[in-house]
Image (tube, rainbow, N blue to C red):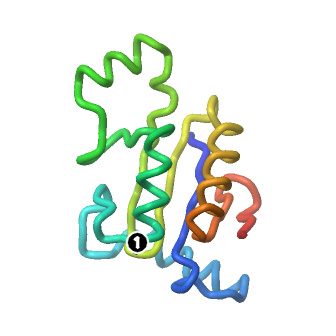
Amino acid sequence: MSYDLMVFERSAAPQDPAVFMEWYEKQTSWSEQHDYNNSEISSPALRNFYSTLIQTFPNLNGPDAPDDEQFDKLDESGLDVYLTDYSIGKNIIYMAFSWSVADDALKKVREIAHLHQVGFCNVSSNMEVE
């Protein structure tokens, strides 16, 4: 089980809560025809968000994942709990964090989402959308 958060391209997301939930379900069906580990398919704002966040919460998979040596250093220092599973779509970035870093993740994701002006959704809580 993970602590899940999502950010999204505001211009692509519906404003109405009920319609947003339908859109969310479609986005998280992972039916886009691309690799969900590459941020290059996302909007500039989402790419900037991702580039900033992986400085604190490195990607567990894909081209931005730590190599074996970097992973060993994270593991030895106890920082491997910050490794995060990202699913990157055209209009969303879905993040699965370790519960042990949930408070840090919530604070940092909110902060960076506001900085890069992308939407925020607390999937693991009550689907709170900002």
Q: Quadrant of residue 20?
A: bottom right
Which residue occupies 46% across, 66% down?
Answer: 46
With respect to residue 55, does 90 lie above or below?
Answer: below
Give the structural element (helix, strand or loop) at label 1: helix
Horizontal side of residue 38 vs 17, given as left or right: left
Provide residue 85's location: percent of width, then percent of height.
43, 45
Residue ID for mark 1: 44
Q: How many marks?
A: 1
The residue at 29%/45% (across/down) is: 64
Q: Is residue 55 above or below residue 128?
A: above
Please give left or right for residue 111 compared with residue 45 in the image: right
Q: Quadrant of the N terminus?
A: top right
User: Where is residue 50 drawn, in percent x and y?
Assistant: 44, 55
Vertical side of 15 occupied by 92: above or below: above
The residue closer to the viewer here, 13 or 126, is 13
As shown in the figure, which amino acid type bears the numbered disc 1?
Pro
Residue 68 is drawn in which quadrant? top left
Question: Within 10 Å of the Cα at label 1, are there few (<14), some (14-19), or many (20+) other Cα atoms?
Answer: few
